[in-house]
């Protein structure tokens, strides 16, 4: 790893920790927590790409960031709709 890759990896790690804290912070809304969890997965997929694992990066981006975030928002919408009834 050269110095630039190391610096970028450290920045990604700090971003992942920051968004993970945002996801579990109790004062935030559920939508922000879902978006923050999706961002953690997106940062993880970039990290996998830096670590020369493009197949794992694509899977993490598609499933971890994309599908899971969509599924959480879908369920959140269903829960809110059932609370209104």
Image (cartoon, helix red, strand yellow):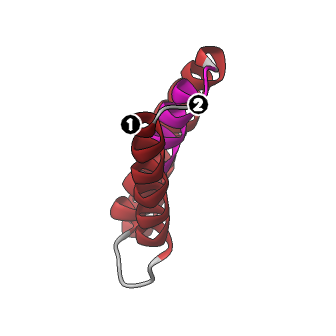
Circle 1 packing at 10 Å, graded few (<14), some (14-19), many (20+), is few
Residue 14 locus on image (x, y percent): 44, 60
Residue 12 locus on image (x, y percent): 43, 48
Extreme residue in the bottom direction: 27
**Magenta-span inclusion, residue 46:** yes
Q: Quadrant of the N terminus?
A: top right
Count how many numbered circles sit on residues in the image.
2
Q: Which mark is residue 4?
A: 1
The residue shown at (39%, 52%) is: 11
Mark 2 in CB contact with mark 1 (< 8 angstroms):
no
In the image, which residues are magenta? Answer: 40-52
**Magenta-span inclusion, residue 51:** yes
Q: Quadrant of the C terminus?
A: bottom left
Q: Which residue is mark 2?
A: 48
Residue 58 visible in the shown view: yes
The residue shown at (64%, 15%) is: 55
Cα distance in 3D space between marks 2 and 1: 16 Å
Magenta-drawn stretch, dominant element (helix, strand or loop): helix
In terms of depth relative to the viewer, which is nearer, 10 or 80?
Answer: 10
Label 2: state its secondary structure. Answer: helix
The residue shown at (47%, 55%) is: 16
């Amino acid at each position: 790893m050269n110095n630039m890759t190391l610096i970028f990896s450290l920045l990604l790690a700090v971003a992942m920790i920051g968004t993970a804290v945002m996801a579990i912070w109790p004062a935030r809304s559920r939508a922000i927590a879902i978006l923050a969890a999706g961002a953690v997965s997106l940062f993880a997929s970039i990290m996998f790409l830096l670590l020369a694992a493009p197949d794992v990066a694509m899977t993490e981006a598609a499933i971890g960031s994309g599908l899971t975030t969509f599924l959480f928002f879908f369920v959140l919408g269903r829960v809110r709709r059932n609370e209104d009834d």
